Amino acid sequence: MRKSIHLLRSLLWAILLIIIASSVANSTVNEAQSGLPINPDDEPHPDPNEENYPGMIYIGRHNHHDGMRTGFHTDNGLKFIFGTGFDETHKEIEEKDLHHEHYGPDSEHDISDRAHGKTREQVMHEKRAGKLDLSKGPKPYGWFEEHPLDGGMVPPKVVRVDPFFMDEAPVTNKEFGKFVRATYYETEAEKFGWSFVLSSFLPNAENLHEAEVDPEAEDWVAVDGAYWRNPEGPGTSYKYRENHPVVHVSHRDAAEYCTWVGKRLPGEREWEAAARGGNVGPKNRTLYVWGDEQTTDAAKEYANLWGDGDFPWDNKAEDGWRATSPVKTFKPNLFGLYDMTGNVWEWQRGGKHKSRIVRGGSYVDSLDGSFNHAATLGVRATLHGTTTTGNVGFRCVKSPKRKEEYHWVYENEGSGTAELVLEDENGNRKQRQTQQNQQPRQIEIYEDDDEFDEEVIHDPTKPRPDEMRKRVLAVKPRTLRSDEL
C-alpha cells in the first residue's frame, strides 16, 4: 500500500513537471513568433562598422586608437558649436564643454558659464528663479536670433547630434531623372507652371522689364515653363548638366525623392556638424570650409561662389563657373563631403511650411556678405516650402540601424487595444503587423487606483475589476529633440 502511494505521488509530480515545461515552451514559441525578445536588454547593439552605403559618408564618433566607429553601447554622437562664425562669443566656450560626459536631454542646459565666472549651479538658479525680460516680447517656438551677414544663430551654442550617414554630394539631375521616370513624379514647379530664374540668366533679356520678380529678391524673375528639365525656361535643357545638382525643386520634391531612395532630408544641426568637418571646438572652429582666409583665391578651390564681380550682371567666373557646377568639382571637406559651401542651397528637415530651412549658400553668394549671404559654415536662410529656384537643391541622409528599445504599455487604455509602434530609419512611425491568433506577451498586474466607487461592495480578498489591468511589451518610440522633426 505504501509503495503504491509512493508511485502515485511520483507520477503526479512527473505530470506536473511536464505541464510546467509545456507552458514555458509554448510561451517561448509565442514570444519568438511575435518577434518580441525574451529579454530585450540582452539584445546586442548593431555594430556601426558593419553598415555602409554607396556614396554616403558616416558622420559620428570614432575611436582614437584604431579609427573604428564608436558603437551604440556608449554615447557616439557629435558635439559641436552650432551657429554663426561671425560672433566671437564661441571662443568663450571651453573644450571641456564639448566632452561627451555632458550628454542627455538636458545637456544643452547643463554647462557652466565660465566666461562670466559662474558655476553650473548659479546658471541653473538664474534660469529657474530669474526674471523674464518682457521688453523683448514673446518669441515663437524654435525662434532664434540670426546674424545679419550669414543668417546663422546668434549667439553660437553647444549642441549634439546622433551619428548618421550623409550623401557625399548633392543629388544630381541624372539621379533625380531616374526618380521621375520610375514614379512619374511631377514637381511643384511643373504644377505651378513657372519657377524663379536669375535675371542675368534669362534667354531673352528684352522681356525682363515685363517679368514678375520675387518681392523679397528682385534679381529673381518668375519664368513660365522653367523647371528642373528646363533650368532657364523653354529652349534650355539640363542635358549637358546631368552631373550638376538638380534645381527648381521644392521642399516636398526633395523629401519625396529621399523617401523613394530610403533616406530622408538632414536636420540643420546634422548638416552643420557634417559641414564643419571636425573643426568644431573653440580653438579650431573656422569661418569657412578652407579656413579663415577671406579671399577669392582661397575660396575658388573649395566653393562655387559669385566671386569679385558685381551681382547680378558681372560674374568673372574665377572658380570656372557662372552658375551651377558639376558635383565633386571642388575639393571636399575633411569628412570627404563635397559642395558643403556654395553651388546650391540645400533643403533641410524641419521648420514650418512657410519657413523651411536651407543651408550652405549657393553660386550667387559672397564671402563677406556684401551682397546676398556670406557663405560661411554657419550660413542659413529660410524659404517658403513651395519655393523653386535655380539655386536650391538638396542631399539626403540616413540614420544607422539602432537597437529597438522596449517598455511596458497598458492594454485597454484609450483605444481599448494595445498597438506595437515602430519607427523606421527615416523617423516615420508605422503600425506593426502581427499574425492572426497571435497575442503579444502579457502579464496581469494589480495596481492601486485612486478612482473607485465607495458604494460598490466587493470581496476584500479579491481584486476589483478596475484594479486588474494588463500590460504588453511594446517598442519604445524614439524621441527626436530640437527642431529636427
Image (cartoon, rainbow, N blue to C red):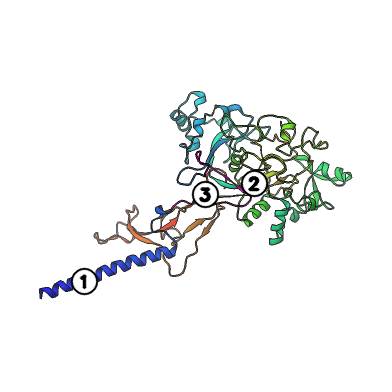
**Marks 3 and 2: in contact by CB < 8 Å?**
no
Please indicate whether residue 435 sits to the left or right of residue 138 in the image. left
Q: CA distance from mark 2 to mark 3?
A: 18 Å
Q: Nearer the viewer, mark 2 or mark 1?
A: 2
Judging by the rendered image, the residue that carries numbered circle 2 is: 168
Crowd band around label 3 with a 10 angstrom C-alpha radius: few (<14), some (14–19), many (20+): some
Judging by the rendered image, the residue that carries numbered circle 1 is: 12
Picture quarter with the N terminus: bottom left
Q: Secondary structure at mark 2?
A: loop
Magenta span:
44-68
Q: Residue furthest left?
A: 1
Q: Secondary structure at mark 1?
A: helix
N-term mark: 2 or 3 = 3
N-term mark: 2 or 1 = 1
Q: Where residue 52 appears, x then y in whole percent?
A: 57, 51
Q: Is residue 65 magenta?
A: yes
Q: Secondary structure at mark 3?
A: helix
Q: Which residue lies at the image location 61% right of the left edge and 42% below the top edge?
A: 271
Q: What amino acid type is highlighted by mark number 1? A: Leu
Q: Nearer the viewer, residue 245 or 234?
A: 245
Q: Residue furthest front?
A: 66
The answer to whether residue 187 of the structure is visible from this angle is no
Q: CA distance from mark 3 to mark 1?
A: 53 Å
Where 17 falls versus 350 (above or below)?
below
Q: What amino acid type is highlighted by mark number 2? A: Glu
